[in-house]
């Protein structure tokens, strides 16, 4: 059985490599031809961005009322939707979290403001920011500590097989690693008919195209934390090398896959995707069907786009 | 106890004593800079490459996370059994007891006590005490130099007792020339700056048209995103990101409309998190082009002061901690005139004045220069040293930290600013690791700054074995060129110049031997220069050094010609000709065309 599987893998890889060598548009064509826009609701790939989170005064003293200002927006000019809400969440270590809306104080620059409680000596306050735009895409700061946070929810699609229906993507920040979890409406399956199933959360390194030494587009700069149940294969691989989803990477595994309760979770070092991942990773959850004879990809369901910032802001009152 | 056991116990005690004594012996400082203010080093101890952190209740989570993050990046596993870090928060007065008193404590960056740290490494225990987050960070940066990887999962950890603080609370690199570094290059510079405790990066490349010629245009989202990356990288390394805005081309100094445009641009950067602004009026032939300005202001100084004050006030309304620097038209020397007197009278005392010393490229900077500035301008200068050579700083006296809290260097030659043979026009951010190293050393510990030692350290750090002399040669040669370009009248002479000067002063005694030695060294150096690009650890630095090496031939020819003339004079035993030939050799080596 194992030998048969390996032979099949080798055959598929050979096939896909040849196909890629002869037809560089093959992946794109199959994506375009088979996409279901109603399910792949990504809003033009444009997530809002958090450009700056700043505290005033710089070092709060006892008695100060620290103010957080956030610069956020969808700046590309590619989309018409705007920031719908900006929220500030704060807490003391081990304490309850409080969330409040931030007020727009500068429309030209997209600057929002909220005051934190009056500072007392010795206070340590942690805070994060989240932004949602009018399309439903989001930008979220996820603090270290391993707490799982919802990045994006996706409505259930009755037209889809539950094994292909993505319901949510969650994230947890473990400091050196992040975990992304994708929740499905049903148990993840190996196949539906002749279609093999593949699952993944794609993290895009958004600025690569501006790097003079590289020519990748934003699309091909993504990294896929993926799982192909038919081959029990999971790893983190460049999205431009989807064929890699069918074979484990040669080096040590970059993503450690765990499956439980219709959820698939990948834990990996975000620096693999981009060195300064603190500046934001654009994340999309996706379920794919792959035609086993033509290897054509069919995007079955995706979440909206979230800009993930695995960071926390904090200050200590001295 | 039986006699055998007693003897064994005595032997064990003696052995223990010998081992302890050996361990307690001081060891040489591991090679790194900036040199700590006070440090004693001891023998190495083996430890597992893992860490645990014991932080007292006053230590912020940010500091604990920072330690875990950097140690993780350096390959330490987070688990017991390796190096234990004990972090203790001290009241500021404990750090003030050991650190230098700053010229002033006016801004959030002025206090060296907050950057002070006490680091003890004993066995596998590391104790860090500090009075501010910056101090803990700098202790960690120093710790990085105190271990080396040995066997798999093991390190050798140098014992140390360090008390350390900076002389200048603000130590900066100013990207302030006509060229422009790219974002990736800048990020590399910032990574390096953090590792050597430089804590201010000023973005002011005149090649960014939106900073200067097209100052009215807002940055687009791509540009903002790249600024965000720079600012966040700076935060990671406790660096303040400064932004330069240069509006004099076309601005109406008193106009509300122009001011609104200026603030709209500045607010973009403030929104990103910039808290340090430089309003630059330099190098623009500023004039009051608008009749309204001529009616409103008595002179250009008044106009610039008016705009600067208004700018600072508006920035401060948004950020109470903002630092504003204005760089006037007259930014070198002290020249009493209507323009400068107006600045003295009208400029808000909270605003710093950017100043490069007595000259645009100051041959020397000493206490007298600083006092002259302070006496006239009634405030400390924001000192921006236009040192345009990859050679370490010379003729900056160690005591100038007493007269300003800020020492920044503009490595403008790394943008093709001055006509370095073969280099003109090149953008070389990676070379900041060579050139700005001296700034890191001088601004932190000026008393320990020695150009010759810096040259040795740079060669050891950047050149592969066998290439050190060739690497050093290129540094010396760049200094000769720079000295000639700016006609620097400094007392500093390179080791090779000193050798020849000594021979000349001894009436030519030893000239023969030195001639042979110089020839041999030159030949060996010339050979290595052919492949210096491969002789540097950092390929970017190697590439830049190769460009400089490729145009060395005329220099060698000139020195060879001078050596030949000396050889002839020595053979002829002609004292007068020998003396003249020795002068010619010294001039040729020092790159002086005479």
Image (cartoon, coloured by chain):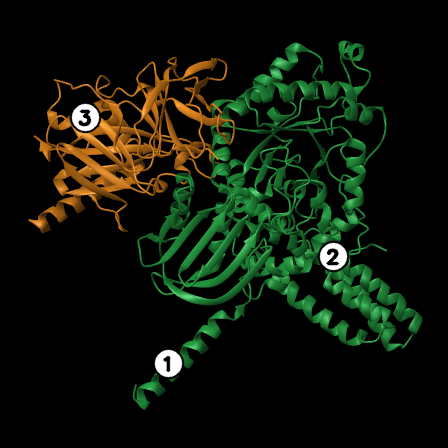
**Mark 3 or 2, which is nearer the eye?**
3
Q: Are marks 1 and 2 in contact (CB under 8 Å)?
A: no
Residue A166: image tag: 3
Residue pushed farthest front?
A: B1
Q: Position of residue B267 (x, y in %)?
A: 55, 20
**SS category of the residue bearing label 1:** helix
A6 in relation to B415, above or below: below
Q: Residue at x 63, y 36 (%)?
A: B105
**Do the residues marked 3 and 1 share a common chain?**
no
Number of numbered discs overlaid on the protein picture: 3
> Is disc 2 on the same chain as disc 3?
no
Provide the residue designation for mark 1: B12
Seen at 76% across and 73% down, the residue is B514
Q: CA distance from mark 3 to mark 1?
A: 69 Å
Q: Residue at x 48, y 29 (%)?
A: A62
Residue at the disc numbered 2: B554
User: In the image, is residue B92 above or below residue A87?
Assistant: below
- The numbered mark, 1 or 2, whose residue comes first in the sequence reads 1
Expressed as whole percent of the image width and height from the top left, the position of residue B209 reads 62, 26
Q: Chain of mark 1?
A: B
Colour representing chain B:
green
Label 2, secondary structure: give it.
helix
Q: Report the Cα–Cα distance between label 1 and label 2.
A: 67 Å
For mark 3, name the chain: A
> Is residue B404 among the parts visible in the rendering?
yes
The reply to whether label 1 and label 2 mark residues of one chain is yes
SS at mark 3 in the image = strand
Few, some or many residues within 10 Å of mark 2 (<14, 14–19, 20+): few
Alpha-carbon neighbours of circle 1 within 10 Å: few (<14), some, or many (≥20)? Answer: few
Q: Tell me the subunit letter for badge 2.
A: B
Q: Which shade is chain A?
A: orange
- For disc 3, the neighbor class at 10 Å (few under 14, some 14 to 19, many from 20) is many
């Amino acid at each position: 059985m194992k030998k048969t599987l390996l032979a099949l893998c080798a055959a598929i890889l050979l096939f896909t490599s040849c196909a890629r060598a002869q037809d560089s548009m093959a992946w794109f064509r199959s994506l375009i031809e088979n996409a279901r826009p109603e399910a792949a609701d990504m809003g033009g790939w444009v997530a809002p961005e958090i450009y700056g989170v700043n505290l005033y005064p710089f070092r709060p003293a006892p008695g100060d009322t620290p103010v957080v200002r956030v610069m956020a927006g969808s700046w590309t000019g590619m989309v018409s939707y705007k920031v719908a809400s900006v929220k500030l969440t704060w807490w003391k270590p081990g304490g309850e979290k409080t969330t409040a809306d931030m007020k727009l104080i500068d429309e030209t620059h997209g600057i929002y403001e909220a005051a934190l409680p009056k500072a007392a000596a010795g206070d340590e306050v942690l805070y994060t920011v989240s932004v949602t735009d009018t399309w439903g895409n989001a930008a979220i700061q996820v603090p270290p500590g391993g707490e799982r946070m919802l990045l994006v929810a996706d409505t259930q699609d009755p037209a889809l097989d539950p094994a292909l229906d993505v319901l949510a993507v969650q994230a947890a920040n473990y400091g050196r690693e992040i975990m992304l979890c994708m929740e499905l409406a049903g148990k993840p399956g190996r196949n539906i008919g002749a279609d093999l199933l593949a699952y993944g959360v794609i993290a895009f390194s958004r600025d690569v195209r501006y790097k003079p030494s590289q020519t990748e587009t934003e699309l091909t700069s993504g990294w896929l934390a993926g799982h192909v149940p038919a081959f029990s294969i999971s790893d983190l691989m460049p999205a431009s090398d989807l064929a890699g989803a069918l074979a484990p990477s040669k080096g040590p595994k970059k993503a450690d896959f765990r499956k439980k309760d219709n959820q698939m979770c990948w834990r990996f070092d975000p620096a693999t995707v981009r060195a300064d991942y603190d500046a934001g990773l654009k994340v999309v959850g996706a379920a794919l069907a792959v035609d086993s004879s033509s290897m054509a990809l069919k995007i079955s369901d995706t979440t909206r786009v979230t800009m993930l910032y695995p960071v926390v802001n904090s200050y200590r009152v001295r | 106890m039986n006699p055998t056991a007693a003897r064994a116990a005595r032997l064990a005690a003696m052995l223990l004593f010998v081992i302890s004594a050996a361990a307690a012996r001081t060891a040489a400082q591991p090679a790194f800079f900036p040199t700590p203010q006070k440090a004693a080093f001891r023998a190495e101890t083996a430890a597992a490459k893992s860490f645990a952190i014991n932080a007292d209740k006053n230590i912020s989570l940010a500091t604990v996370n920072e330690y875990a993050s950097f140690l993780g990046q350096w390959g330490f596993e987070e688990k017991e059994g390796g190096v234990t870090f004990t972090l203790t928060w001290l009241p500021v007065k404990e750090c003030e007891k050991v650190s230098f008193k700053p010229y002033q404590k006016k801004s959030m960056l002025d206090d060296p006590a907050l950057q002070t740290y006490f680091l003890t490494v004993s066995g596998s225990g590391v104790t860090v005490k500090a009075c501010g987050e910056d101090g803990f960070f700098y202790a960690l940066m120093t710790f990085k130099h105190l271990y080396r990887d040995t066997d798999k999962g093991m390190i050798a950890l140098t014992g140390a007792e360090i008390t350390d603080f900076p002389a200048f609370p603000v130590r900066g690199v100013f990207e302030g020339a006509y060229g422009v570094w790219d974002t990736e290059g800048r990020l590399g510079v910032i990574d390096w700056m953090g590792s050597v405790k430089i804590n201010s990066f000023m973005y002011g490349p005149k090649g960014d048209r939106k900073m200067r010629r097209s100052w009215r245009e807002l940055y687009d989202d791509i540009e903002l995103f790249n600024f965000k990356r720079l600012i966040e990288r700076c935060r990671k390394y406790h660096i303040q990101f400064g932004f330069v805005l240069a509006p004099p081309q076309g601005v109406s100094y008193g106009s509300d409309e122009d001011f609104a445009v200026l603030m709209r641009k500045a607010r973009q950067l403030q929104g990103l998190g910039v808290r340090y602004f430089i309003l630059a009026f330099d190098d623009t032939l500023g004039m009051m082009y608008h009749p309204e300005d001529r009616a409103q202001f008595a002179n250009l100084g008044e106009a610039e002061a008016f705009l600067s004050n208004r700018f600072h006030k508006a920035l401060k309304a948004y950020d109470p901690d903002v630092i504003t620097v204005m760089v006037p038209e007259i930014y070198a020397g002290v020249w009493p005139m209507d323009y400068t007197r107006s600045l003295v009278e009208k400029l808000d005392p909270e605003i710093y004045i950017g100043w490069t010393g007595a000259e645009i490229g100051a041959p020397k900077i000493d206490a007298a220069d600083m006092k002259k500035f302070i006496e006239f301008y009634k405030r400390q200068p924001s000192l921006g040293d236009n040192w345009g050579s990859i050679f370490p700083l010379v003729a900056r006296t160690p005591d100038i930290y007493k007269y300003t809290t800020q020492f920044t260097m503009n490595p403008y030659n790394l943008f093709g600013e001055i006509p370095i043979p073969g280099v003109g026009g090149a953008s070389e951010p990676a070379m900041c690791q060579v050139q700005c190293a001296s700034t890191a050393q001088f601004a932190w510990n000026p008393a320990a700054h020695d150009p010759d030692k810096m040259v040795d350290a740079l060669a050891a750090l950047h050149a592969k074995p066998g290439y050190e002399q060739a690497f050093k040669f290129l540094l010396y040669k760049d200094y000769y060129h720079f000295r000639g370009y700016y006609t620097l009248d400094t007392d500093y002479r390179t080791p090779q110049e000193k050798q020849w000067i000594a021979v000349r002063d001894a009436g030519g005694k030893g000239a023969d031997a030195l001639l042979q030695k110089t020839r041999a060294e030159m030949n060996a150096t010339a050979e290595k220069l052919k492949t210096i690009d491969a002789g540097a650890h950092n390929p970017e630095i190697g590439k830049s050094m190769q460009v400089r090496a490729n145009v060395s031939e005329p220099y060698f020819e000139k020195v060879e010609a001078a050596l030949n003339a000396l050889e002839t004079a020595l053979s002829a035993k002609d004292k007068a000709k020998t003396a003249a030939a020795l002068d010619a050799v010294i001039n040729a080596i020092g790159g002086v065309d005479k």
